Amino acid sequence: MLNNRRNFIFRVSIVINIAVLLYAALHLSSTTSPSVEWMPLTVDGSERSAEFRYINQDEVRNNTDRAESSVRNFEESTSQKTPSTMATTNKTQSSTASIPELEKKVNATMPESDTNGTLEIEDEDALNPATLAYLRSLLACNDRDMLPVTTQRGEFWVLKNYVRADHGFIQCHESITYTTHAGFEFLDNVQPLVERWMAPVSLAIHAPGSDLAPTVNSIRYLRDCLNNDLVKQFVTFHVFFSHKHIPSTIPDPEKFLQQPYNCSLPPPHIVNANSTYMKAKSLLYPVNVARNIARDSAVTHFILPSDIELYPSPNLVPRFLNMIARNAKPLSTSTKPRVFPISIFEVDAKVQVPSTKTELRSMLANKTAIPFHKFVCPNCHNIPQGQQWMNAAETNQMDVFHVGKRRGKFVHWEPIFIGTHQDPYYDERLSWEGKKDKMTQGYILCVKDYDFMILNNAFLIHKPGIKHFVKNAKRDAIAGKQSLFVKNVIMPQLKTLFGTRNGCAL
Ligand SMILES: *[C@@H]1O[C@H](CO)[C@@H](O)[C@H](O)[C@H]1NC(C)=O
Ligand SMILES: *[C@@H]1O[C@H](CO)[C@@H](O)[C@H](O)[C@H]1NC(C)=O
Ligand SMILES: *[C@@H]1O[C@H](CO)[C@@H](O)[C@H](O)[C@H]1NC(C)=O
Ligand SMILES: *[C@@H]1O[C@H](CO)[C@@H](O)[C@H](O)[C@H]1NC(C)=O
Ligand SMILES: *[C@@H]1O[C@H](CO)[C@@H](O)[C@H](O)[C@H]1NC(C)=O
Ligand SMILES: *[C@@H]1O[C@H](CO)[C@@H](O)[C@H](O)[C@H]1NC(C)=O
Ligand SMILES: *[C@@H]1O[C@H](CO)[C@@H](O)[C@H](O)[C@H]1NC(C)=O
C-alpha cells in the first residue's frame, strides 16, 4: 500500500518534471526575440535590456546552448541554495589544476599572433587583447551571471545582488573581485577601497532588523553623493540577516534607485557604532557567513577575500593578471594548488596611505608604517620572508617573491590572499567576536599542501591609525568558548573530512 503510494508519487513527480521541461523548451523555441525569457525581473523590453547587461552573453547567444542553460537556471531557482559554484564539467575542475597541466590544453589555443608562445606586455597596468585572449584559455573558467536572488543560508536570509554595480556582465578571466563584508557603520571604507582597487567589489552587509534602513540609505549615499561614480560602477551590495531578525520592510531597489539621494543629509553610515540594532540586541557578527556570501556572488575566476578596512595597492588587478599570463616560474613549474598572499601594513592616523612599495619602504624606514598588528598580535600576521620582502626594492612588474607554506613558524598564519572559487570556504559556525575565524580554512589549505605564492610589489594598508592592544573581557569570554568549540568539535570533523598532514595545525 505504502509502496504503491510512493510509486504513484514518484510517477507523478516524473510527469511534472517532464511537463516543466517541455514547457521551458516550448517557451524558448517559440520566442523570437528571446534570450531572456526565463529571467525573473523582466517586465517590458527596456527592463529586459537592462537585465541583459548582467547575463552571461555566451549563454544567450546560441539557441541550442540557451535551452540547456535555461533548464539549469530553472533548477537552480527552484532549489533553496544559492546557485552552485561547483560545476561538474571538466572545465571547472581544471581551474584548480596547476598551470603546467592547463598548458597542455592551452598550447592548442594560443593566440595566433603569438607564434613564439611569448606575450608582449608593454604596459603592466593594462591588459591588452592578446593577453586577455591568452588568459581566457589559460584559466578555462566559467562565466557567471549577476541576477538578484533571495535565498537562504542556514538561519540567514540572503538578498544576493541586492544593489548591483553598473559594470554589467564581466567575463571571468578579465578582472579580479575584491570580496568583503561589513555592518553599515563600516561603509566609510568603501570609497578609499574602490578608488584604489578600480575593479569589481562584492560586498555582503549584515543588516538585521532596523539596521536595514540606514544600510539602504548608506548604499544610496555612496552611489549618489561622492565626487566620482566608482561605487556605482564597481560595487555590488548583498544584504543578509537572521530569520530571527527580519527587517519590518525590505525596500525595493528597483524603486529606491530611481530617486537620487538627498546629499545634503549627513552620511548615514557615520554613527556611533554602539547605536546599531546589532549591538542593541547583542548579536554576534556572523563573519564567515558574510565572507562566503560575498565570495559566492563574485563573477570572476580570481577573488581577493579581504577585510573592508584593508586598502590594496593601486593597479594590483592588471599587474597580477599580466603576471598570470606571463606564466613564468614558479607559476609554470609548481604542480600544487596555490594562493597569492599579500603583505599587510598599518600606517599612522595622520599620514597618506602609500601608493607604491617604494613609498611604503620609506615609511617603514621612518616608522610611519609598521607590519600589520605589530602591537596587537606580533606573530599572527608574520609572513614567510617578511623581513626580506621589506628589504627588497620595488621592481617593474609583479612576480612571486617567495613560495611559503603554512607550517613551522607560520603554522598559525592567517594570510589574506588572492585565490579562486575552488579554495576552501570559511566555517559559518564561527563568529568574529570569537576570533581565529579563518584558522579552519588555513588548516585545510595546509592539509591540501597549498603553495603560498607571496607577491613582490603588492600590499594592503589598513585604514590609517595604528592599533594597540586593548583588553576586552567580554570578547575574551566569547573567544574562549569559540576556541574550545573549534578544538573539540570542528577539528575532529576537519580531520575526518580532509585528513591530516605532518606540520599542519589549526
Ligand atoms: C550553437 O551551438 C551548437 C551546438 O553546441 C553549434 O553546433 C552551433 O554552431 C552554435 N551556433 C553558434 C552561432 O555559435
Ligand atoms: C572529462 O574527463 C574525462 C577524463 O579525462 C573524459 O573521459 C571525459 O570525456 C571528460 N568529460 C567531459 C564532459 O569533457
Ligand atoms: C607548450 O608548447 C611549448 C612550445 O611549443 C612547449 O615548449 C611546451 O612544453 C608545451 N607545454 C606543454 C605542457 O606541452
Ligand atoms: C618571435 O621571436 C622573435 C625572435 O625571438 C622576435 O623578434 C619576434 O618579435 C617574436 N614574435 C612574437 C609575435 O612574439
Ligand atoms: C535635503 O535635506 C536638507 C537637510 O535636511 C533639507 O533642508 C532639504 O529640504 C532636503 N531637500 C529635499 C529636496 O528634500
Ligand atoms: C561603546 O560602548 C563601550 C562599552 O559599553 C564603551 O566602552 C565605548 O566607549 C562606547 N563607544 C562609543 C563610541 O560610545
Ligand atoms: C616618512 O616618510 C614618508 C615617505 O617618504 C614621508 O612622506 C613622511 O613625511 C616621513 N615622515 C616623517 C615623520 O619623517
Image: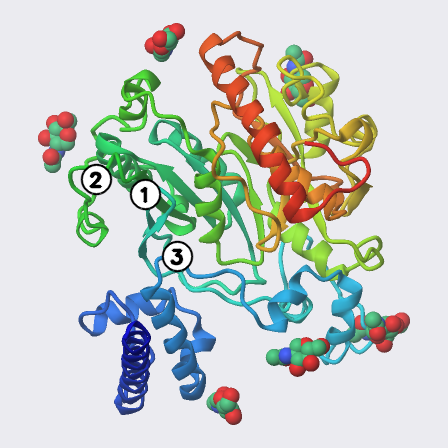
The mark found on residue 261 in the picture is 2
Report, in whole angstroms, how far the alpha carbon at label 2 lies from the one at label 1.
Answer: 9 Å
Residue at the disc numbered 3: 81
Amino acid type at circle 3 is Lys
Pinpoint residue 468: horizontal percent, then vertical percent. Answer: 58, 10
Residue at the spot 57% in from the left edge and 45% down from the top edge: 304
Figure coloring: rainbow
Q: Mark 3 or mark 1, which has the lower sequence index?
A: 3
Left or right, 341 with respect to 56, comes to: right
Amino acid type at circle 2 is Tyr
Mark 3 crowdedness (10 Å alpha carbons): few <14, some 14-19, many ≥20: few
Quarter of the image for the C terminus: give it. top right
State which quadrant residue 393 falls in: top right
Pinpoint residue 156: horizontal percent, then vertical percent. Answer: 34, 42
Residue at the disc numbered 1: 223
CB at disc 1 and ligand 5 closer than 8 Å: no
Amino acid type at circle 1 is Arg
State which quadrant residue 490 falls in: top right
